[in-house]
Amino acid sequence: MDALSIIIICILYFYGLVSLYTAFLAKKRNEKGAFINNLVNSLILIASITINISINSLNISNIGFIVFPFDVFMIIFLIFFLPHFSFSVNRERRKVRLNEKHIEEENSNLSEELPFKYELYRKITHLVVLGIAFFYFTLGFLVQNIFTNILELFPEIVSELFFSIYDIEANKMIFTQYLVVFLVGVSLIGLLTADFIRILKPNLYPLKSVNRILREKERHMRLGPHISMGIGCFSIIIMFGLFQPIGPIVICTSMTMSIFGDMTANLVGRKFGHKNIRKTKKTYEGLIAGMSIAYISGIITLLFINQLYPINLFSLMILPSIGTFIIGFIDYLDLDVDDNLSYNFMLSTTLFVISLFIMGL
């Protein structure tokens, strides 16, 4: 592992520790739900990085954490992003000093019950995660082709070096794995940076309008749902993406099922639900609708991937079925941990273990 990779890993560990700090700060302030959610997010982020390092140190996979040029790109992102965000925070500090009363009134106007249109907005933003699947199996290959065409302009010794780094001729998805780790990694760092300010210094948070799509319990010490989504996606990518092609297949299937299942359950439950599950705000109508759409989206995803990597019929039927059961079970339990994390992590882990035995790839 080179120096830049070690630096990036240390930065991610630092973010994991800060997230852990927010968990214990929430406990100190008697916010039980925020404590549990932040704690689980932190532990999964730290554990997934550690597992990735262990897999590489034991030579279980020939795919590293991140390599050139993506490690350089990530450092460049940090060099530009952190000062820019600091400038935004300082600008917000000046605004607070000049107009503190207005800021307090703006925060007080947030309603406890999230309006349906804002619920719809936050669910639509989850569709961005589908870009990960496209980069694994479509857009990533396009970037790779551009990359290899550029290499042809360099001397043969340079192109051979890059081909050996990515093993492009033997496994085309090694390049897309590094690409996805980079894209999701920089997104997670940016989102975590902003959310730490929102939690620790709420008056200095420069993205206060984002608070309007947060539920009441998410506006204080609790990490936002976008953080849980980011950590959920990043953790499964750096753990299971190393094992190809099973890993990316499971990752894309799990994320697709999680996104559409969660969106459908929430929106249908809010709009058409009548029979509540125990004493929660979730409904059986939303639960059934979410499970149905999750299953259908899982089947469609695997059929799409089947055009690139043949998947046996048994796997096509059993993986979405098991995934649907897991989504329904987690939704029924209504855990303190955000669904965006629990769905992705539990679904991917279970399907990955099962896939090792049943997928004839």
Image (tube, rainbow, N blue to C red):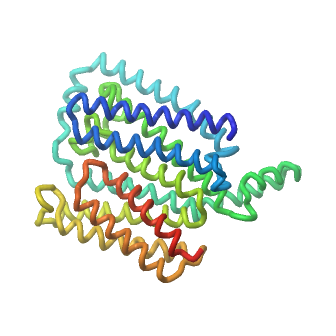
Q: Is residue 208 above or below residue 283?
A: above
Count the labels in the image.
0
Q: Does 316 appear above or below 198?
A: below
Picture coordinates of residue 297 (x, y %)?
40, 71
Q: Is residue 197 above or below residue 356?
A: above
The answer to whether residue 307 shows anywhere in this view is no
Given residues 139 and 322, the one toward you in this image is 322
**Foreground pick, 160 / 151:** 160
Percent across and percent down for residue 247 are 54, 62
- Quadrant position of the N terminus in the picture: top right
Residue at 33 percent of width and 56 percent of height: 123
Q: Quadrant of residue 199?
A: top left
* Residue at horizontal 58 percent and vertical 47 percent from the top: 54
Point out residue 207 in the picture as x, y percentages from the top left corner.
Answer: 36, 35
**Among the 4 quarters of the image, the one containing residue 103:** top left
Q: Residue at x 62, y 36 (%)?
A: 6
